[in-house]
Amino acid sequence: MSLIEMHNIRKDYHLGETVVHALRGIDLEIDKGEFVAIWGPSGSGKTTLLNLIGAIDEPTEGDVTMAGRNIRSLSDNQKSELRNERIGFIFQSFNLVPVLSAVENVMLPIQIKGVSYSEAKLKALGRLKEVGISELAHHRPFKMSGGQQQRVAIARALVNGPSLVIADEPTANLDSETAQIIISIMRDMNENDKITFIFSTHDQRLLNQVKRMVRMEDGRIVNGDARR
Ligand SMILES: Nc1ncnc2c1ncn2[C@@H]1O[C@H](COP(=O)(O)OP(=O)(O)O)[C@@H](O)[C@H]1O
Ligand SMILES: [Mg+2]
């Protein structure tokens, strides 16, 4: 059984009278432990696809299963739990809480579960160390570079020990050298901890560290099995 299975997935957005066919029949299977890039031009459907995989949105047609469970069959509570416990999210704009320090940002997903402050802090500090920015633990995001903020976001995505991390254009706001570093941090975690990573990008230069490339154009996968 694959970790993610999607068969003939369609997603339409309705904008008044017009319908946008964002996904036009997607078949995709992703196994546990894969490191996959979804790459394609802006508007090709990458974010829409990732939102379906992350149980943030539902398809218009077709079913998405995660570890054999149909996401459509889950209650809202079960979906929230899935997103908080099993999946880590990383975003293009980092999405850190500006009034909180780095370590407090990383603690958030653990505190939601009712874990004590001191235990959450210990775990969060451990994750910040893994991404190489322990010394910035008590800084607020606005004092950090984009690359440092994205490391905090990676630490936050990993703090609950997810089996899957979804990253939507995690390097789009970074210079290319920093982008390479961010991808290699993700790659190391994939290798060492066997966490499945799915990330989107429109930057072909980032694909050299990727095991599998899924190419999207106009709501379709045009090459889903390119591997190295
Ligand atoms: N919430 C939305 N409402 C209407 N149209 C949308 C919405 N989100 C995305 N789209 C449209 O769906 C298509 C795919 O968008 P998206 O998944 O964001 O692509 P990408 O992430 O590859 O840039 C685009 O034509 C986009 O304009
Ligand atoms: Mg997008």
Image (spheres, helix red, strand yellow):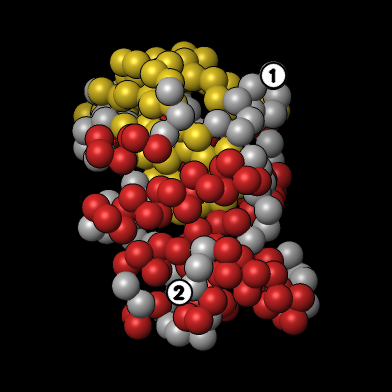
Report the residue at 71% width, 76% height from top. 122
Report if the beta carbon of the residue with label 1 is closer than 8 angstroms to ligand 1. Answer: no
Note whether 98 is above or below 218 in the view shown: below
Name the secondary structure under disc 1.
loop
Position of residue 111 measured from the top left corner of the image (x, y, whole percent): 69, 71
- The quadrant in which residue 191 appears is top right
Instruction: Work out whether 209 lies above or below 87.
Output: above
Give the number of the mark in front: 2 or 1: 1
Q: Quadrant of the C terminus?
A: top left
Residue lying at 70% horizontally and 45% vertically, measured from the top left: 78
Residue 192 drawn at (x, y percent): 62, 46
* Residue 186 spot, x, y in % from top left: 49, 49
Q: Quadrant of the N terminus?
A: top right
Mark linked to residue 88? none
Within 10 Å of the Cα at label 2, are there few (<14), some (14-19), or many (20+) other Cα atoms? Answer: some
For the residue pair 40 and 225, the one nearer the viewer reads as: 225
- Residue 97 is tagged as 2
User: Is residue 83 found left or right of 220 in the rendered image?
Assistant: right
Which quarter of the figure has residue 218?
top left
Does label 2 point to a residue whose CB lies under 8 Å from ligand 2?
Answer: no
Disc with the residue nearer the chain's start (2 vs 1): 1
- Compared across the picture, whether 49 is left or right of 174 comes to right
Give the residue drawn at x 37%, y 32%: 38
Q: Amino acid at mark 1?
A: Met
> Can the viewer see residue 94 in this picture?
yes
Give x and y (percent) for residue 44. Answer: 26, 30
Q: Say what amino acid the circle numbered 2 marks.
A: Val
Query: In the rendered view, would you say 171 is above or below 52?
Result: below
Where is mark 1, residue-wise? 1
Which residue is pictured at 32% across the width and 72% down the height? Answer: 145
Q: How far apart are labels 2 and 1 at the CA level? A: 37 Å
